[in-house]
Amino acid sequence: MANRAYEPLTTANTAVVLVDHQIGLMTGVRDYSTGELKHNVVALAKAAKALDLPIVVTTTARDSMWGPTFPELVDALPGIEIIDRSTVNAYDDARVANAIEATSRKKLIFAGISLEVCAAFPAMTAAARGLDAYVAVDASGTFSETKRQVGLLRMQQAGVILSDYATLMVEMLKDNGRPEAGAVYDALDMPWATLVGQIARAHGK
């Protein structure tokens, strides 16, 4: 794949798509602990809200197979509709596709369980449609090391950009002087950043 010129994520060109962070699927994740994965997904959601990004949330077979979205994520996204669907690829559901298109954003950050299906399939679809697709790898999870490795490889082959959730959010923040900065770092739950700020204030800096 040819290298592309770097074009930053901004709060004006980016939306977030959260796919299938459901209780039943969480129980099978093996590349992250349940606690770490929940933390990362909730942090991503809260930071996206702090940056006022459009957020699309979807589940699959919520009532018949995989159960509801885990409660901590629901609590982090009050008032946001969770679209339940039957399609494996979230982009194949017209309601999800319409919700994504309604954001009018050309850069999409995906996260999902599982990484190689629920995050990868819609991300690869977005890339094929000429959009810039990103996957927050550590806000996704999967069921074996093989699935993780081949999923990452396949996405890279398809032109999906891989990153971690905090880097994507900080890239959009861009300037630590912005009024949203405190809320973003609080959402990312970076205690060392808070500590440094407290030390600086204690010394009158």
Image (spheres, helix red, strand yellow):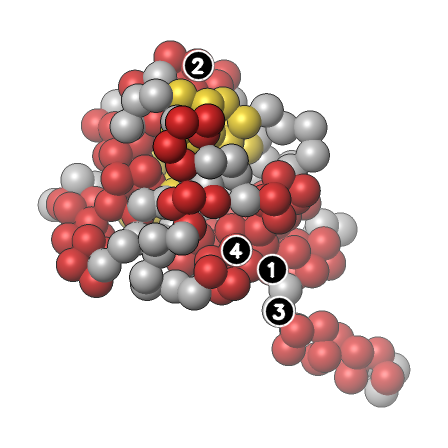
In-front residue for pair 84/18: 84
Q: CA distance from mark 4 to mark 1?
A: 12 Å
**Mark 3: which amino acid?**
Met
The secondary structure type at the circle numbered 1 is: helix
Query: For numbered disc 3, what is the local secondary structure?
Result: loop
What amino acid type is highlighted by mark number 4? Lys
Q: Tell me the amino acid under the disc marked 1.
A: Leu
Q: Which residue is mark 1?
A: 188
Is residue 81 visible to us here?
A: yes
Residue topped by disc 3: 190
- How far apart marks 4 and 3 lie (CA) works out to 15 Å
Under mark 2, the amino acid is Arg
Residue 60, image x and y in percent?
Answer: 39, 29
For disc 2, the marked residue is 95
Comparing marks 4 and 3, which lies closer to the viewer?
A: 4
Quickly name the residue at label 4: 38
Mark 4 or mark 2, which is nearer the start of the sequence? 4
Q: Nearer the viewer, residue 86 or 81?
A: 86
Q: In terms of sequence position, does the residue under pointer 4 or pointer 1 come before the other?
A: 4
**189 sits to left or right of 162:** right
Quarter holding the N terminus is top left
Tell me the crowding category of disc 2: few under 14, some 14 to 19, or many 20 or more residues within 10 angstroms, Cα based: some
Nearest the viewer among 137 and 21 is 21
Distance between the alpha carbons at the discs numbered 3 and 1 = 6 Å
